[in-house]
Image (spheres, helix red, strand yellow):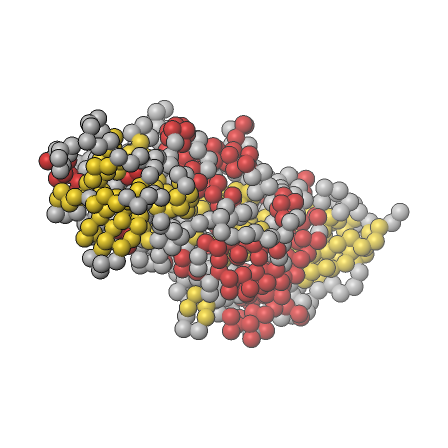
């Protein structure tokens, strides 16, 4: 009877790895005959012999080898739950194992339908690899979406990377493939081997839902149990997070690339735990409220800085394992610092082991390259019109806020998502159904993901890097907005950096570049961002954008920071900017920490620390940041002197500060400025102070108002404006 119930074609398909449904051929199958009640088949090309062993009984049935490549079968009277396989391997060692093909599916119909609808918000709890107990047996469940694949297998060291051995079960409705492999555990290396519908054997694929990967250049996924880590973070953090992420909070963000903030001897990376004990105390000391990490989701190429993500659910193994990263997040929270992750849903790389052509055809990407490829970046664009892809992305966003307890996501390259003609010439893009250039599917996706994140994690925040004039980016979805909490103010950044780069003698001719922003400053919840993009690719470091000799460069930088920290909007600067890094950022080496020995660099660092503390302590600098009520020009038109003067108001308008920036190296004596009331003022900040390596010019004594109308105010004061400096005045005494 050997092989009587398998056709020759079935046998050939099994041993050549072309069987698309091994569950119908291998494992336990009941028979309708009198000689035996069932047949058990297994395929193991590495075995010398195999027997079926009854659980709890001294019954052993040798299996007959019905094909030389390792196909075995035995006819038995056992039930499906009553046996194991005793395998003797080439080294003569015996191993008692469970039969992979005796286990029922792990993925249920509910999961299948939710994926098809695009509404499985915790899909990461089912897809990928999970250490579980299934039918009373411990092992690892695997699930992957590949609807157009002919066959999908899990391969790894455990099966000698042989795709014939652990062929997965297909759920035809959703296109999910799953399998439970007993006796595997955390730390197992694996990939997916896929045969396309047209019969091609594809490059091995990393798990799209994998939680951990090998350190590049290796690319295998690693089974990881996300339930291992025991959180002990600040029990009050949720309340703190709600406060620090609110619209009226003083948000000051330190943007960091973990691999180059600081390095060990031998130019080696600090790991997540070392960074937790070095970076976090520094960020806290400097007074920043948030730390933003350039993408830590796994990526293959260091030079992409993480923006070509390949593992949307895996923290990069460059700096340690997932528990190490959880420790880092936890220590941030214990220090009172919120964590923002850069998150890339705009595109993904074409690396063979990644998402591109995942099951042999476009799956995660748009099929037409006029929508599905970024020619400039050499990357693929997610298909935002496909429910399963949208679900994948939303599940990733949810995952980081849920599993890693991060406090916000900054969406990269949003403009490239919104416009179908982004960086494309006529004829290279496809209009939407109305003939327009807007990607309606991407808009819907962004609105959906923001709605879900703010609904599920109301104390968290989302940030958009959006570089165009798209309206209502940070407005609620129900009034037509994209639903982000905040938007980077790219227009402000371009204008002010261009202004500051000019020799002061020419600044009067472009005075409006420093004032124009107020025309739209309250149209969004803006973040004033000086990010990594401004200090690479021959753009110069922030310090070296400033004109003049060494003294003038530092004076310009300090004056700029005074202006930035007092202008409406939340703050973001890139690592190294806070101490005046001379060199452009280089991801292959540490910041130049030796500059802390230079008093000029130390002075800039001291100024930024002071401004952060002042920002957090003065409601006039952070309340009502999205309302014109927080700001009033005193004089926006003094181009001849290149002086800017304005008032910042708290919600209680009795609480205010007066700010003046002199963007020339000329001391302005007896400079008159109008003020709102009769009182005395004190100078609470001066970027030209000796302690900041300035010239020490300023207003050391209380400044009394005079009954002289000026700038449409009944009262005014006469000041000395230091060169290339920003000063802040605070009302000290008021007459009753």
Q: Residue furthest top?
A: 434
- The answer to which quarter of the image holds residue 281 is bottom right
Furthest-left residue in view? 8
* Residue drawn at the location 70% of the way across and 53% of the way down: 617
Q: Quadrant of residue 366?
A: top left
The vertical placement of 598 against 624, above or below, is below
Residue positioned 60% across, 49% down in the render: 251
Residue 488's x, y, as percent? 51, 45
User: What x and y, as percent, mark residue 498?
Assistant: 48, 54
Q: Residue furthest front?
A: 58
| Image quadrant containing the N terminus | top left
Q: Is residue 419 above or below residue 679?
A: above
Relative to 399, residue 436 above or below: above
- At x 51%, y 70%, the residue is 593
Residue furthest right as drawn = 736
Q: Report the residue at 35% width, 35% height from top.
A: 105
Closer to the camera, 693 or 322? 322
Q: Is residue 666 left or right of residue 98?
A: right
**Above or below, 253 relative to 98:** below
Residue closest to the eye, 555 or 314: 314
Can residue 360 be seen in the rendering of this structure? Answer: no
Question: How far across and down, in percent of the image, does residue 82 sit?
Answer: 33, 39
Question: Is 143 situated left or right of 693 in this image?
Answer: left
Q: Is residue 186 visible?
A: yes
Q: How many marks?
A: 0
Q: Residue 30 or 133: which is nearer the viewer?
A: 30
């Amino acid at each position: 009877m050997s092989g009587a119930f398998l056709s020759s074609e079935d046998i050939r398909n099994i041993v050549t790895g072309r069987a698309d449904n091994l569950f119908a051929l291998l494992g336990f199958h009941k028979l309708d005959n009198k000689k035996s009640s069932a047949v058990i088949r297994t395929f193991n090309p590495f075995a010398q012999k195999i027997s079926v062993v009854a659980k709890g009984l001294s019954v052993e049935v040798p299996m007959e080898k019905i094909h030389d490549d390792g196909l075995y079968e035995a006819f038995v009277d056992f039930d499906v739950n009553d046996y194991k396989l005793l395998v003797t391997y080439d080294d003569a060692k015996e191993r008692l194992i469970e039969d992979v093909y005796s286990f029922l599916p792990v993925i249920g119909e509910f999961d299948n339908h939710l994926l098809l609808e695009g509404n499985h918000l915790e899909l990461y709890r089912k897809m990928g690899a999970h250490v579980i107990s299934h039918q009373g047996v411990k092992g690892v469940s695997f699930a992957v979406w590949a609807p157009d694949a002919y066959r999908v297998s899990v391969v790894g060291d455990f099966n000698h990377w042989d795709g014939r051995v652990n062929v997965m079960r297909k759920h035809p409705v959703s296109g999910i493939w799953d399998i439970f492999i007993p006796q595997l555990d955390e730390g197992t290396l694996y990939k997916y081997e896929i045969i396309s519908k047209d019969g091609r054997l594809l490059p091995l694929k990393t798990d799209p839902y994998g939680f951990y990967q090998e350190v590049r250049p290796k690319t295998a996924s690693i089974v990881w149990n996300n339930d291992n880590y025991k959180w002990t973070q600040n029990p009050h953090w949720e309340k703190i997070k709600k406060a620090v992420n609110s619209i009226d909070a003083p948000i000051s963000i330190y943007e960091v690339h973990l691999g180059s903030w600081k390095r060990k001897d031998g130019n080696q990376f600090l790991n997540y735990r070392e960074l937790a004990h070095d970076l976090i105390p520094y960020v806290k000391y400097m007074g920043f409220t948030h730390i933003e990490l350039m993408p830590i989701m796994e990526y293959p190429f260091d030079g992409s800085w993480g923006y070509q993500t390949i593992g949307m659910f895996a923290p990069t193994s460059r700096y340690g394992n997932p528990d190490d990263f959880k420790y880092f997040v936890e220590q941030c929270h214990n220090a009172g610092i919120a964590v923002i992750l850069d998150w890339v849903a705009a595109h993904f790389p074409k690396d063979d082991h990644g998402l591109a052509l995942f099951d042999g055809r476009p799956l995660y990407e748009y099929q037409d390259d006029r929508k599905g490829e970024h020619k400039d970046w050499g990357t693929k664009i997610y298909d935002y019109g496909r429910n399963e892809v949208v679900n994948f992305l939303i599940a990733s966003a949810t995952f980081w806020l849920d599993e890693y307890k991060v406090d916000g996501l900054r969406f990269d390259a949003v403009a490239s998502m919104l416009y179908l003609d982004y960086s494309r010439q006529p004829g290279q893009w496809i209009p939407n159904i109305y003939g327009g250039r807007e990607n309606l599917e991407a808009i819907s996706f962004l609105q959906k993901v923001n709605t879900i994140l703010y609904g599920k994690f109301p104390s968290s925040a989302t940030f958009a890097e959006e570089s165009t004039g798209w309206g209502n980016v940070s407005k609620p979805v129900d009034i037509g907005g994209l639903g982000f909490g905040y938007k980077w103010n790219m227009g402000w950044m371009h204008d002010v950096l261009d202004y500051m780069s000019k020799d002061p003698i020419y600044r009067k001719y472009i005075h409006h570049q420093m004032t124009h922003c107020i025309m739209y400053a309250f149209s969004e919840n803006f973040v004033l961002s000086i990010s990594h993009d401004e200090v690479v690719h021959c753009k110069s470091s922030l310090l070296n954008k400033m004109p003049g000799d060494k003294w003038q460069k530092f004076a310009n930088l300090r004056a700029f920071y005074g202006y930035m920290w007092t202008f409406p909007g939340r703050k973001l600067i890139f690592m190294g900017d806070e101490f005046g890094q001379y060199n452009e950022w280089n991801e292959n080496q540490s910041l130049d920490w030796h500059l802390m020995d230079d008093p000029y660099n130390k002075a800039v660092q001291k100024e930024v620390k002071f401004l952060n503390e002042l920002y957090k302590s003065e409601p006039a600098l952070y309340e009502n940041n999205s309302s014109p009520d927080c700001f009033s020009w005193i004089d926006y038109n003094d181009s001849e002197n290149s002086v800017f003067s304005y008032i910042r108001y708290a919600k209680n308008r009795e609480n205010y500060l007066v700010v003046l920036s002199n963007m020339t190296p000329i001391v302005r004596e007896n400079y008159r400025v109008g003020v709102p009331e009769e009182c005395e003022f004190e100078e609470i900040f001066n970027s030209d102070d000796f302690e900041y390596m300035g010239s020490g010019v300023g207003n050391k004594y209380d400044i009394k108002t005079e009954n002289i109308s000026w700038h449409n105010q009944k009262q005014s004061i006469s000041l000395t404006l230091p060169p290339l400096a920003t000063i802040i005045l605070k009302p000290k005494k008021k007459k009753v």
